[in-house]
Image: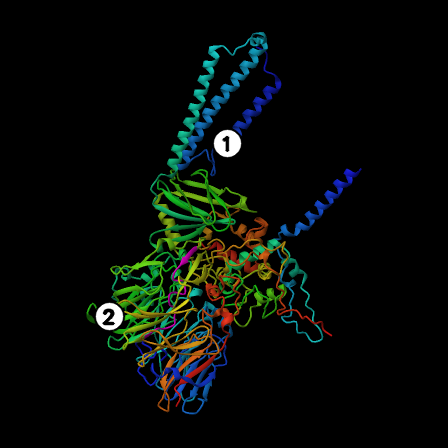
Amino acid sequence: MATLDYANTRYSTLGEINRGNVSQLKVAFTFSTGVDRGQEAAPIVVDNTMYIVAPYPNVVYALDLSKPGAPLKWKYEPKPAPASQGVACCDVVNRGAVYWQGQVIFNTLDGSTIALDAATGKPNWRVQLGDINLGETITMAPMVVKGKVLVGNAGGEFGVRGWLAALDATTGKLAWKAYSTGPDSDVLIGPAFKPHYATDQGRDLGKSSWPGDAWRLGGGTVWGWISYDPELDLIFYGTGNPGPWNAEQRPGDNKWTAGMFARDPDDGQARWFYQFSPHDVFDYDAINESVLVDLPVNGKPRKVIVRPERNGFVYVLDRASGEVLSADAFGHVNAITGIDLRSGRPQYNPDKQPAVGKVSRNICPASTGMKDWNPSAWSPKAGLLFIPHNNLCMDWQPNEVNYIAGTPYLGAESRMYAGPGGNRGVLTAWDPVARRAAWTVKEDLPLWSGTLATVGELVFYGTMDGWFKAVDARSGKTLWQFKADSGIIGQPVTYTGPDGHQYIAVLSGVGGWAGTIVVNNLDSRDATAGGGWANAVADLKQRTTPGGTLYVFALPH
Amino acid sequence: MSSHCRIERLLGVLLLFAVAGCERERREYHAAPAGDNPRPALTEFQPGGSDTAVSAIGAHFEANAYHINQGGRWYRSFNCNGCHGNGGGAIGPALMDEQWRYGGNIDQIHASIIDGRPNGMPAWRQRLTDEQAWQLAAYVRALAGNVSMAAAPSRREAINATPPLNQLPPQPPRGGDPPTVPTP
Amino acid sequence: MSAVPKPLRCLALLAAVCTLLVLSGCRGVQSVLDPAADQAQAIDHVWWVMVSVCSVLYLAVLVALAWALLRARRRREALAEGTRHDPAWRQALVAWSILVVGLLTWFVVIAFLADQKLHAGHPDLEVRITAKQWWWQVEYLSDDPQQQFVTANELWLPRDRTARIELRSGDVIHSFWVPALTGKEDLIPGYTNALLVTPRRAGAYRGQCGEFCGLQHAHMALDVHVVDDAQFAAWQQRQRLPAPVPSTALAQHGQSVFMGSACLSCHAVRGTVAGSRLGPDLTHLASRRSLAAGALPMQREALDQWLRDPQHYKPGNLMPAVPLSERDRAALADYLMGLQ
């Protein structure tokens, strides 16, 4: 699976490549996806075959690693609707496929989930889950838990009502679907639901915390990462921002958006929920990875979730109850002054609260967050969470917005720029027990790629101008780097090849929300272009060009 | 005798100004019926030579300050700014530069708005009146600086994102630098 | 005494007629002289004090002037003498100054007190009015978001309770003025102003925009209804409900015309996919007293004419004439008249 394991650690025990020899890493082979849009996927490797999902048109490639040069075994073209490109907020990306019992299962931009036979590439089943005329797309990497494929939609910027669906992995039949807003019956909240905090307790909060019917357009889409704890038998995932961005049109806490659920994977019933941003005003989606770790908290070992959140805090939550054990800022934050651990609610800075028609300036972190979707990696050996993230602040102006189905439902303009220090990206090695950073590496450009941590005490990540780096997990010192043909926003993975050697694979190809200025050729004279990103990376067109190439590295042998 | 001539001359000049300025203030609340719309070619590539003249109705809309400003209103109200930003683009391409996939003169922009385009531009034909679509097209032209400075709006309504439209240099749809060596 | 000359008699007659006409304006839905709320009462009090005092003084001055003119005819010679050293004259001057200063001070005081009264009160109802060209968006706010709802061009207030009306603008400067209830307050883009209103008499009133805001400034009226608590609660309950489902086949066709045409881009009908705030919320359109912010009565015939060509009644307003067939328009009108 794209997350490497159910716990979302993205930590590999393959140690052939280590701090000592990584400087000798060389390109083993490459492969062009044929699509030069943002490549956010994680290649997955099963039985000496590598499976890659490209961005729209979502071609799936199977590469035969047992032959020299990894030739193409098969490819599958799902042919999604071209119009789906018009309702994808943040480039036409896809975050990868999942392998399960001889099938490769992935999602298409226009909202279908397809299971292919892993050997031949022929489709076993195909289900249409989303409707582009409502602004729905699907970009996330699915996960299979106990024979069910978990799929969530995207479109919080289009007034789409978010959901997480579970399909039978063999047949594609819908097993259950949990919405992120609306009455308890739709959100699959029942007698098993025991949220830790009082503000999350009550009946039909998914309706009563919204005015009128606003919950139908409420967002809370599930376009990010899912974790699974086999011991507790719970899945964990987050919900996206509420819609529209203009918060004045949706007074109330706007449950169950911008928070995270724990659910029973068999029937989808919710066990607990925690809301990171009640009545979110800054587009702080909560879909980031929930890293499942056993940590000592106050001296006692506990099963926790470590979450580097969009709002700038690293949360440590109890896996069973959803209690927040700690929340500490991992960058410069002024939108929120702190998290009240008793009530669980963030304390919003009143100076930074936006109002319609008013421009609020210098809000940190920007709407893209201290860290967006790109996943961090946990090394149990180092006891550190390696977080690839941004250092961006923004000016933000909300205004009234009209809901017209299929068009963006935003109501806010923003202009993003570098935060204090001038560097727009950071790699932070965070110690969740000590609750502070062990070391940081400043990057000029924001980091939009995932990370990979290995037992060889290495951390791999890529920059938006194409440098793929391996740094020392103890200090952050760059031990090896390679300039790829285009910016890297994908998720690096590692595997053991048929020859027994360790390989590192990553897709290069700039894009995503951060890189839209390159792939869509935006004009940065408009500081609000690209949802504010064009201003933040106005120099990106000079630093990289679109691409779509798989790079696989190995030690010389 | 000379003072009469002077007064008459002055009146004549004032009259000229008045006439020239008329277009800026002319407001029409009804547009021509949809049947009068041109069906422009979306490319200049027309075997044997191309005819790229803009229709009279299009030329009229993009010369009128009221229509351009109304187009600016619709641009925000109908969420064009959600996909195209304030001209810089986002989900959709930038509208303030000189690159156009489907043509950048007002007829072609109007057709793109009404008909939609295959890679994500919605078809607005059922959701707008024709006059609104023309007004939007005129505003889109203004975003690239391709309307008369007298007609373009002089202030931005949004977060101060781009220069005022009447200060943008014209960027005609044909991209690239002009040839420096004449065609032999 | 000589007979009153003819022109003077005509003038007196004219003055009497004018006075009667003016007095007839003392009543009516939009009359400032017929206060129906505490705030209007306070303003009315100040107004009457000023009018009375100034009228009395005016008459006194006129009488003095007339007396001086009449006396002057007979005693021209007596006035030739210097009167500046007459102590009675100086006393009269001093007394007059004290009187004027005193009256002016009184005016300042009562105006100040009236102003205090206008801003005093503990509101238990919050309404947010956003003025747009050329209609009023009226949102009833509440701590419980589910109790909130949006309507347009009408304001219902409960009697004997204080409402706080938050004022915002969606485009240019407007001014909120319901003369029978309170004074004017501007709605300025980028600012939020507020007014308190405590109506005391049930009834229907009319407000209008008091700051020139463009072509249709004159056609931007607001229907205000003051009712007792129970009726107000019932009205609020009805407004919170989603739009009624069309019952006849023609109205159903009208709904599909609405959802399939440009109507969807501008108007919201709660309970359907229409959610735009560009134009007035139509969820309970037919329950309102007038159409187009007071420009037309709420009748099917008027609605049909409005749909045919809104530019005819309010040229320059933002609603275009959407081309529809006769049958579609009739169905649409049926559907809209069913939105009670």
Above or below: residue A453 compared with residue A47: above
Badge 1 element: helix
Residue A456 at what x, y percent from top left? Answer: 32, 81
Q: Secondary structure at mark 2?
A: loop
The type of residue carrying mark 1 is Ser
Q: Is residue B135 magenta?
A: no
Q: Give the extent of the magenta segment.
A: A360-377
Q: Which mark is residue A320?
A: 2
Q: Is residue A368 magenta?
A: yes
Q: Nearer the viewer, residue C188 or A4?
A: A4
Q: Chain of mark 2?
A: A
Who is closer to the viewer here, C115 or A420? Answer: A420
Q: Which amino acid type is shown beneath numbered disc 2?
A: Ala
Which residue corresponds to mark 1? C24
Q: Main secondary structure of the magenta part?
A: loop
Q: Taking C181 as reference, is C321 above or below it?
A: below
- Labelled disc at residue A177: none
Whether residues under marks 2 and 1 lie with C-beta atoms below 8 angstroms apart, the answer is no
Q: Is residue A203 left or right of residue C50?
A: left
Give the image location of residue B18, x and y in percent: 68, 47
**Residue A316, above or below C219:** below
Q: Position of residue A516 (x, y in %)?
A: 48, 69
Q: Nearer the viewer, residue A119 or A376?
A: A376
Q: Which residue occupies the extreme left position in the image?
A: A300
